[in-house]
Amino acid sequence: MIVWIVGGRDGKDVRRGVAAVTRMRAGGILAANAGPMIRELDRFPGPNLHLPHPCILAALDGRAVAGAATVPPRAAAALRTLLLDAVRANRRLLPSSRNDAILNSGVPQSPAVLVALTCCELQRLNGEGAGGWRILEEPAQDPAIIAFGYETLKVGRAAMAAACDLVAAAAAAREGAPDLPASVAAFLEMARRQSLGITLRRVLNAAEQRGIPWQRVNEGEPLDQLVELGEGCHRQRLFGATSSRTPMMGAMIADSKRLSAQMLRRIGLPAPRNALAHSIEQAQRIAGRLGYPVVVKPESGANATGVTVGVTDRDALRRAFEAAAEQGRVLIEEFVPGDDHRMLVIGGRLVATALREPAQIVGDGVSTIARCIAEANRDPDRGTKFLNTRATIEIDDAVEALLRASGRSLQSVPAAGEIVKLRRTANISTGGTARDVSAHVHPDNRWMAETVAAMSGLDIVGVDFLTPDISRPYSAIRCGINEINTKPGFGPHFGKPGEHPDVVAILLDHIAPPGATLTIPTVAVCGRQDTAPLATAIGEALSRAGLHAVVASSAGIVSGGRLLNGTPMLGASRAGGAVLSNPDAQAGVMTMTPQRIARRGLGWNRNDVAVLVGPAGDPDDAAAMKLLASTTRKGLVVMAEAMPGLLASGVLEAAPATLVVCSDAAACATHRAAGYPSVSPGPEGMALLQPVGRAWPLAAGEHGLVAAAVALVLALPTGRGEAP
Amino acid sequence: MSTARTGTAAHHGETAVLATQCFDGPNSYLPSRALLAKLDPGWIAGLADSRGRLQAGVAARLQGVLLEHFRMGRRLTLSRDTEQMLSGQPSVERAVALVTVELQHLAGERVGPWHVLGAPGAAMPPAIVLAFETRAIAMAAVGAACHLVGAACSGIDPVEHASIARFRAAVLRHGLDNTMRAVVTEARRRAIPVLRPDENRPCLQLGHGREQRSTHNLLSDRTSQIGTMLAGHKNLTALLLARLGLPTPPQAMVATAADAIDAARRIGYPVVVKPEASAQARGVRVGLDSDSEVAMAFAQARRYDGGVLVEAFIAGVDHRLMVIGGRLVSTAARRPARVTGDGATTVAGLIATLNSDPERGAKGRAAKATIAVDGEVRRVLARQGLTLESIPEAGATADLRLTSNLSTGGDAEIVDHLVHPDNRRMTELIARAAGLDVVGIDLLTPDISRPFHAVRCAVTEINTQPGLGPFTMPGRENAAVVEAMVDLLFPAGDPGAMPCVLLLGGDRAEATARALHDRLREAGRQPARAGRSGLAVGGIPSAGPPLSGGRDGAEALLCHPRADTGILTITPDAWRDHGTGLETWRVLVLRDAGLHGCRRAAAGLAAIHPCPVIAETALARVLDELPAERLILIDDGSPSIARHKARGGRTVADQDVPQRLAELLAR
């Protein structure tokens, strides 16, 4: 099948594209050849006429996917099995209730519905916030036009072909669970590489719950884990658990295990003695000097990659050196016996201490070690590392070697209650577990961890502390700070509710004051005519309230009254970016036309006030204004002349409140009687909001009244200190 | 004890140094860091005349060698004392000391007083002791100096020798570059203490203890990691700026040469090809006019980490705008390396003449980098219809490169007075948007005096760890940048020096230190105490080893991020063998007079700083040079107390010593 690429990302009218596809279908072109079954038609970076969130619009040849116009319930069930068993990255994730109901419905479904929901679930079940989907045209027809949400464009786009293959596999399955198509496996690999780590994901989920907006800066390398939270002057960045405040120098210290140990020892904190080895011979000399056993590790690096603990002889040293050398320069370090503690310091305060244990199993007297591992891996918290709170225990050479060292093999049967350690390192990413021991930390050790934070300047830091007893002061026993971790994963502090301190909430409180949503008041001005002068007038009203306003309009970008860029800002998404990414912005004003909203959707998720200029005569305009109204948090400001048209088209119902701007007192009274507060010129050069009775200084010019109305909806204080 | 033998090869200079010892602070020889080198009397005798002096003319040769080979491209000269002594016939030891000092001085190091110890015929072998700044450089310098003196006497090649190579390597590895040197000088001018706990890294610690701030090159200890990462990726920088509505060149990330050519055609020739994540113009090719040039440039650029960018070539002058602490502090207009013809010399000859400028030398150390004649130079010449053999007319200029970085031989001019206020505001906005406290912004514009939104211009890069090169060129020093950097770290007038008490002695000194520590804690301070019993900070003991002489004890106090007061105890033996890493102290306490060497150490220490001294009466005799108002004797009822009081001196009861120390510290 050949589907024409229509629409595209350059602002061409989607509707035209859809019409073209429909024409092709009428001409019977589509059914003939095999080929791509799904094609992207367009995408929207914000709320749009199809869905209230970012989405991809695609044309789908459902018959080509499923081989029939409908898919039997058996195939839907097979699809569900595939999604749950093979697709999801985390066993705590479930399909959305709407999608689950469809998969379980027991009635035949159209391929388009299954593909659309699969597009969403492929993303959701890998931890992305995909949103919903809908079918734009009759689902039974080909090509169907589907719209589905995405969080990461790259993943959303790749989900289309994977979804088709997955649905096709389910439809073709006769009995039992079908195999996962190779293309879907490739998609999962890409999506997981691309996905945000579990620490960052949890922080963002908590941020969303607090009403803090966020976005990714870059969807691919480099810095694909970099996100921005909040708007304008409140904007904060997070890169994993690195904040805007985290200093580069601290990260450099943490990144070099040799340097960090040297600095720790300089100020009297316990750190293992170590030295860089450039050759195996040098490694042997150093190990001889330190005394076996030693630890061999890459000088920089994370997640225990290339680390060998407890090297006891020259042969083992050679192997360990070679393993570490693959990661970079090699450090030979004194072995400090003790349990591995992760001490998390945020904002200079020790907030959680977890005791980390290497992957281990407990025998039952009957099962082999291999079997116990399989059993442990059934824990729903275990799964792909970095996407789950605990990682699957993988059986590799290191595991088998450790078992051999204690005279066991995978087939040994440990006694009931016997604990068998499977690894020497306690990293969560290699299957380790952790429990909170915050209550047992000796005050000197707390002081020590907080001093490490002060020394490195790191505002968020994980201190790896080896000690046989966390409740005894570090100066009283043999112990050592093994590593300083910048961008620490919070894995050791995740668990069932109540087991650990809520480190995610603490991190969020660190970057945003409790209760703050990090948002700035924004005003959207929508009309067919040139709204730049009105936007400027609103910007002036915001300035009067002492706010640095950034105005993006057809006159360009004006920040705090100064021109930043004279190019007209027509695209809603560019205007939104110009305002929300400006570090000076304490308030923003953006203009847009209803046509533009209809074509491209909105570039941001919400605004506080929408000013609707002119009537919504055109049905398309009405739909666009309705969308804008539905994203408005405080209220609409509407000219009296436009009221009849807006009332008739139902736009006002979508908004939480509407305020009518009207110079005529009698007309105002009529609107108030209908339940709409009004703003009109009052005494002493003030604009008066009735029936509330609040006033705002009325600036000269034709837009003064509207600007005052915006200020009144936002309940801004006047900059002059007078009570508004 | 840090003793090491230096010198290895087959010339008689290398066995000249019998032993060296470094003191990382005041010591019994000098009141500063000092290097002691014991010289071989036999070696000296072999070089000297009967009076122990160098033959006539040898010293003058040495002077020539120093100036010719060791200036590191700077306009530095020898000190007048050195010139005077080298114009005569100094003794061998003096010559070695002078050359060691001058080698360091010419490498940009701070130098100070020096002595020759031991007279000819004395029991002690001859030795020199001299102040230094960087340990590794001083150690290498003394070896190199012996070789140079030996070479000057025997007429062999002075420069081709392992000790010289070692010295040069030490300067490059451990010395500070121009930028950091300028910061050190400015900080010292403000009496802010500067420490360099790790000579292997380009790091400085300014201020002590909890007041400390630090830099790594021009990263401050608060420069955001995320901001640094954003600046390190040119495509993300462009995204950030474009979102704000600021001018960026149209660009595309490309993966293959074919992609690069496609992108270049789409963007329109001429274009720039650069690695997405490199610094200092490495791998950057500017002004490419054809597909084949783009393909070649792509092959070059992909050798660096990260992707490759194809970017529109914006005609204009490359400006570097330094924003520090949120303010634009200076702007340099940078010009690519170029030659001006004289109608007779070839381009190659003109380049050689330029490179002979004493300001040019190793990049980062010299004011300007040497111009390397490479393929890029030939390409840029070809673009102007020239070759290396062409002879430009008198007054005609030929560009050698299209990038203006100083590291590729470019030149710079400060244009602060020309910058349009909107351009200043734009750079400050960029610094805020990227969250960077120190940033160098590259703006290509035909006219810096016109607002960025009114001309075709582009911000091509933002740089963390920018070099101050363009702002510290000789003859046009721009103190504003260095001052802003120090202001950023120490905005308040307080220089952040930690008040310290130095105690000399044994058990009694340790007991006094402990009592003072407790007293200060009760007063709400965070004292750090180091001594034979190890380290304790704010009442919390540390795990470390005993600390006394040398730098360990002092560093533990001065580097500790929580300490606000330092208490260091040192034994007389440790003072003699290691000195103390503590450069200054507010109060000196002298106890345990009965310990071996205590009297001598007490007299030496009391002479270093004009601070109050609290001492046991048994030490009063060796302190009688001290003005009475500086000396507070511990009252033990002995007759010397009465004498001291009669002279108007003060006393303190033994149990009140900690209290008195706390009072003296509080002043």
Image (cartoon, rainbow, N blue to C red):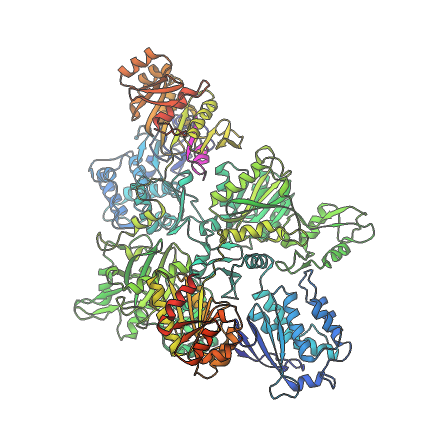
Q: Nearer the viewer, residue A186 or B601?
A: B601
Q: Position of residue B650 (x, y in %)?
A: 44, 70
Extreme residue in the top direction: A666
Q: Position of residue B47 (x, y in %)?
A: 71, 83
Q: Position of residue A477 (x, y in %)?
A: 30, 72
| Residue at 68% across, 64% down | B71
A717 drawn magenta: no
Q: Nearer the viewer, residue B507 or A56?
A: B507
Q: Is residue A500 visible?
A: yes
In the rendered image, the vertical position of residue A622 relative to residue B251, given as above or below: above
Q: Is residue B118 left or right of residue B25?
A: right
Residue A431 sits in quarter: bottom left
| Residue at 70% across, 64% down | B77
* Quadrant including the C terminus of chain B: bottom left
A584 drawn magenta: yes
Q: Is residue A276 visible?
A: no
In the rendered image, the vertical position of residue B352 relative to residue A224, given as above or below: below
Q: Which residues are magenta?
A: A574-592
Q: Nearer the viewer, residue B657 or A30?
A: B657
Residue B474 sits in quarter: bottom right
Residue A300 sits in quarter: bottom left
Extreme residue in the right direction: B344
Q: Position of residue B305 (x, y in %)?
A: 52, 54
